[in-house]
Image (spheres, rainbow, N blue to C red):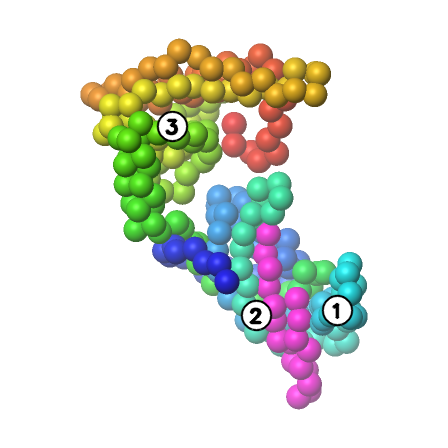
Amino acid sequence: MKYSEGKIGRVFVIRLEDGDKLPEVIENFAKDKEISHGMCLLIGGIQSRGKVVVGPENGKTTPIVPMVTELSGVHEILGVGTLFPDGNGNPSLHMHAALGREGKTITGCIRPGIETWKLGEVVLLETRYSAKASARAFFRMRDLLNKGEVLFIVADQEALGGEVKGKMFGKEIRIFGGPFILGRKTGKPFLPLYTFRDGKNRIVLNFEEPFYIDKERLDISVDRVMNFFERHIRERPDQYIWSQDRW
């Protein structure tokens, strides 16, 4: 068993209209509202001919072959699901639901696709990383720096909380503030690092001159790091592929 500790962020109440398709409509909404993690509750009606995964053909063999059933007639639905980023960083809804009609129930995963009948009601709860867990990580990293260790931190990832603002390619973005606060608290220098492929099956690590975080003007140091990333991306745009609409 593995677990993560988090907290509830924004809460959205969504009315689905007749013909709205699931899971697409929820995933598109989450992408538009920049929700990467969440929990989703659904009640309403589902049109005939929707498809639901009702189990594997054989639970002991791989690859797994899903059993998909098609709904016959309009069904009532009660569903619960989670929202997490897929391999491309886009929000992906994993919802299991009970669908009933005339006293009979079909239970399964709605991933193959269903459509709303008349209306549906969704409560979407955004989940965010725990402040307590972040604080523990921060103090652990601070202690390591004070012992003379070196930390490698990806500083250009967009943050959901505890962020600082910076600009890349003329657009304001939010990035994790932890690396900058660590540098200011410990007095340890930043050593900017960028990697690229040299065309000879090698990865080149490009270090630049270290610098110290400006203790009075944090924004100056943030701009310096963002300019560093933007400069290298512009030099080798073919090596930096990002499918999300961030910049």
- Helix, strand, or loop for circle 1? loop
Neighbour tally class for label 2: few under 14, some 14-19, many 20 plus, Cα within 10 Å = some
As displayed, is residue 174 above or below residue 5? above
Residue at mark 1:
60
**Main SS of residues in magenta:** strand
Q: Residue 87 placed where, x, y %?
A: 62, 44
For the point 34% across and 43% down, the residue is: 137
Residue at mark 3:
150
| Mark-to-mark CA distance, 1 and 2 | 27 Å
For the point 59% across and 56% down, the residue is: 93
Residue at mark 2:
79
**Residue type highlighted by circle 2:** Gly
Q: Quadrant of residue 115?
A: bottom right
- The label nearer to you, 3 versus 1, is 3
Q: Which residues are magenta?
A: 92-109
- Helix, strand, or loop for circle 3? loop
| Mark-to-mark CA distance, 3 and 2 | 46 Å
Residue nearest the viewer, comparing 138 with 172: 138
Label 1–label 2 contact, CB within 8 A: no
| Mark-to-mark CA distance, 3 and 1 | 45 Å
Which residue occupies the extreme left position in the image?
216
